[in-house]
Amino acid sequence: MLELTGVHVAYGNIRALQGISIRVGAGELVALIGSNGAGKSTTLKAISGLLRPSAGRIEFEGRDISRASTDVIVGLGISHCPEGRRVFGRLTVRENLLLGGITRPIAEVRSDIERVTTLFPRLGERMTQLGGTLSGGEQQMLAIGRALMSRPRLLILDEPSLGLAPMMVERIFEVIDDLKRGGLTMLLVEQNVHHALDSADRAYVLESGLITLEGPADVLRRNPQVEHSYLGR
Amino acid sequence: MDVYLIQQIVNALSAGSLYALMAVGLALIFGILRLINFAHGDVMMVAAYIAAFSLFAGLPLPVAIVTMIAGTVLIGLAMERIAYRPIRGGPEVAMLLTSFAVGQILQNGTLLVTRLASQPVQIAFPTPDVLSGVVAIGAVTIPRVNVIGFGSGVIILAGVMLFLTRTRTGLSMHAAADDLPAAQLVGIRVNWVVAAAFALSAALASVAGLLYASQAGQINPFLGFSPVLKAFIAAVIGGFGSISGAVVGAYALGFLEVIPTALGGIADILPPGAVSPEIHDLLATVFPSALGSYRDAIVFVFLILMLLFRPNGILGGRAREDTP
């Protein structure tokens, strides 16, 4: 479904990605793990068109999207739920969701809002509250709900559990598992490697802009290097 | 005294509407791009010229107004596309300096056009009949342009508020102002939203230009300087970047401005014997009739006090600390 081939991204002189290749098949949950500054968020931003690759190719369902603008990419079916949630703090929950569906016909947006509030009943209770007044966990739900409003076929999640209380982390991973059971393809960046490898089918390890390991999640979990560096054993 | 008071209130409301039309445009652009568009006053000036030349050409008023709005919107869009888009996301100082440059270009461009049309620098504005003369309500006579200016300002601003809170494009402007990258990520076409904000802000400035020119009776290529400063002050008073704040700040500024004029020489306006001679002398000393001419100085002192003690404006706490 999604295929990155030899993707390079540079910030000025800093080469953040040095030719990475990643594949996400339909219905898969693929995790991208690595330490801070390894290039995980950069990879996601390149996919969603916030950053332009200096070399390499990004294909979504056979179509080259490496030069497409973000709104076109969202329209094609990729939705990127960014790190730090980034909900529109001065807009209400309903307005946040409404804008999540900006690429969709307005007539269908209303029923999609209902779909999202069925998934996150807590959001349904807070429709008129401003995004900025929600708790961290609620904001993460809103960010995921907003990302789902464009009816993505590929959902990109950047650090969905970052800074959340343990109970809320569990809840977010329940949602991710639910979405996976529903057949949604996902690419997940997550510092909680334990959880990420539990939920994922496959995973890639990114270090200093290069893919150093890849494989099925349960194989990577037993890899001594992964155990040592990311699972703290 | 009552007549005088009512006249001053209408003056304040009318000036407030004009400042609000300008300040909302500044706040819209600043909210999204962090750009203080000082060329905004010159956009308003160009609108006044388009209106003047349309009326000189004998176009009926509604056609002249449509021409003025359309022409001004085109200039706003061109300004965004040519000058601001290439440096979007750059340092705020670069954007600010660019806005001064754009303003200079608009002023000198207008000057050139007036020369080519063999017109003097300062020309009499062909104020349409509907905007000239006075309205008499009992003993009170009020310039008609002030009444229409206040009324049309309120209607237009209400429409803008509805647009910004009820339509997807309007909400997209809010979202872009709140968090530009996040707005991009949900699929908002940021270029389109920014262009729409410039178009709307130019349209509002054009209405302000027509009202301003009709009040002043004369136009020149440099008339935009004072209104854009006033709109800036209004936006600061209200809380910069907030649209509702800009409106509140504009009307507050309208009232603030008439106070020195209203109080100046108040002792001489009071009916004889209304106050004791001592109080009359005190009033004459504290509020000399020349007080009105210190209007701008008083307004700027107020601005400085606002910046010192309430930098987030009347609708305080709305200042944002966005990370780019």
Image (spheres, coloured by chain):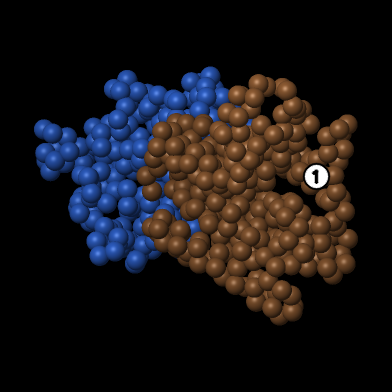
Chain colours: A blue, B brown
Displayed quadrant of residue B276: top right
Which residue is labeled 1 in the image? B143
* Nearer to us in this view, B260 or A1: B260
Please say whether residue A18 is visible from this viewpoint: no
* Nearer to us in this view, A132 or B161: B161
Tell me where residue B175 appears, x and y as whole percent. Answer: 52, 42
Tell me where residue B31 appears, x and y as whole percent. Answer: 51, 46
Q: Is residue A94 left or right of residue A4?
A: right
Tell me where residue A33 appears, x and y as whole percent. Answer: 25, 43
Displayed quadrant of residue B155: top right
Specify the subunit that label 1 lies on. Answer: B
Q: Residues within 10 Å of mark 1 (few under 14, many from 20)?
A: some
**Above or below for A126 versus A228:** above
Q: Is residue B79 left or right of residue A86?
A: right
Tell me where residue B306 appears, x and y as whole percent. Answer: 46, 37
Residue at the (29%, 22%) spot, across then down:
A166
For the N terminus of chain B, the quadrant is: top right
Q: Is residue A225 left or right of residue A165?
A: left
SS under mark 1 = strand
Residue at the (53%, 57%) spot, across then down:
B38
Residue at the (71%, 80%) spot, across then down:
B116
* Nearer to us in this view, B147 or B58: B147
The residue type indicated by label 1 comes to: Pro
Residue at the (66%, 31%) spot, across then down:
B267
